[in-house]
Amino acid sequence: MNRSLLSLAQMNSFAIKAYTPQIMEINSKEDLYNLSTSTLHPTNFYILGEGSNTLFVEEMAPTIIHMALKGIKVEEIDDFYRLTVAAGENWHQLVEFCIENQINGLENLALIPGSVGAAPVQNIGAYGVEFADFCESVTWFDFADKCEKKLTRKDCLFAYRNSVFKQALKHKGVITAVSLLIAKNWQPNLSYAGLNQLPKESINAKAIMAEVIRLRQSKLPDPKELPNAGSFFKNPILSLSRYTELTKKYANVPHYHQKNGDIKVAAAWLIEQAGLKGKRRGNVGIHVNQALVLVNYGNGTGAELFNLARYVQDKVYKKFNIKIEPEVRLISSTGEKSMEEFQHG
Ligand SMILES: Cc1cc2nc3c(=O)[nH]c(=O)nc-3n(C[C@H](O)[C@H](O)[C@H](O)COP(=O)(O)OP(=O)(O)OC[C@H]3O[C@@H](n4cnc5c(N)ncnc54)[C@H](O)[C@@H]3O)c2cc1C
């Protein structure tokens, strides 16, 4: 291995031993203005937060733009707190900071790994709550204009694990900060199964956060002990007619109704029914308790994990005629690619 290459093994939760020719650390707006045009060609760079939703498929990665901007500002505006938080802050630490300061609302989103700047990208969500519920605006540094812009929540086009940052704005800039509006009149959200077991008399944001942490730790492997990136696949969303057809054969498929009438189906169930839960292939595998979580047992490579993901996708497709799509971002030496782009060279 070329000694001038930099290891990314500590910068991704799959602990993949990938390398990059350079890491551009972004500690100030100046650092962003100074990024060269050649670096900013889509095949030449990848923006990295904490690497908890990233799979380096190949041994080489492009130049890494690592967001390290820090800072949390709190303002009181009538019935709300406004938090302006820099992209390089850690999401879970932000949740803890809020609860410690009696700014209640983010507790259901505790212990989601990663940076604040990545939170809007896939509109992180858990336990019945998502980032979009609190987003007032996202501050965006546009690479072409070399200036910051504010996108309102509406501009962000948030959807299930999706936003404008994964679509029209991909490769065009970087999130530098987010602004959250959190109501002073706190209302607990206990809609998600598991949280409704909490004793009614002791419900407060701190107790909910503790319960969310307990539930998450009991269900998901800790990436520090067993490297993983949480759910590898998104839950597929089916039209009502397609879902009805599915239930003719599989009446008990776990599902969630969407506002527009579509039905979200549990990808973990599909994978489990395809007989893949707990399956191991060399250095990588599907977690024994969580069929949606792919894990690196030790010296797994990005290619091994990618091939396993393809295998899972194929098996589910053959059994159910449903294509499950990765939630995790797949990175090659020439930037982000879709599963199909990797397959077809
Ligand atoms: C154990 C575990 C559990 C998880 N549970 C959940 C969960 O419950 N809910 C959930 O939604 N997710 C979950 N995830 C996924 C992950 O936590 C989120 O996707 C998180 O937002 C990733 O943050 P990151 O900084 O690590 O992102 P990275 O992996 O570094 O990047 C992810 C994407 O965001 C882009 N990006 C990062 N920073 C910026 C920026 N400043 N500007 C523009 N683009 C940027 C990257 O280019 C990439 O496309 C889990 C992951 C793990 C490991």
Image (tube, helix red, strand yellow):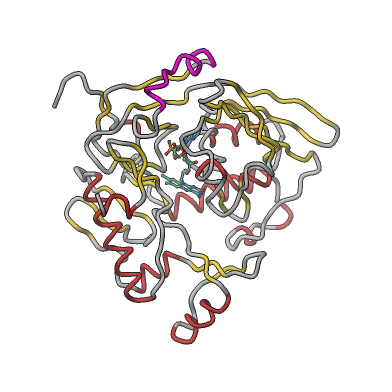
Quadrant into which the N terminus falls: top left
Residue 94, x across and y down, in percent:
59, 32
3 to the left or right of 254 = left
The quadrant where residue 38 appears: top left
Q: Residue at left 70%, top 51%?
A: 203
Q: Residue at left 31%, top 46%?
A: 226
Residue 276, x across and y down, in percent:
29, 67
147 to the left or right of 310 = right
Residue 30 among those drawn in magenta? yes
Position of 257 relative to 24 (above/below): below
Position of 290 relative to 304 (above/below): below
The quadrant where residue 205 appears: top right
Residue 95, x across and y down, in percent:
60, 36
Front-most of residues 92 and 273: 273
Q: Residue at left 76%, top 49%?
A: 187
Residue 343, x across and y down, in percent:
26, 54
59 to the left or right of 124 = left
Front-most of residues 228 and 196: 228
| Residue numbers of the magenta segment | 29-40
Q: So how many labels did they put on this image?
A: 0
The quadrant where residue 279 appears: bottom left
Position of 318 relative to 282 (above/below): below
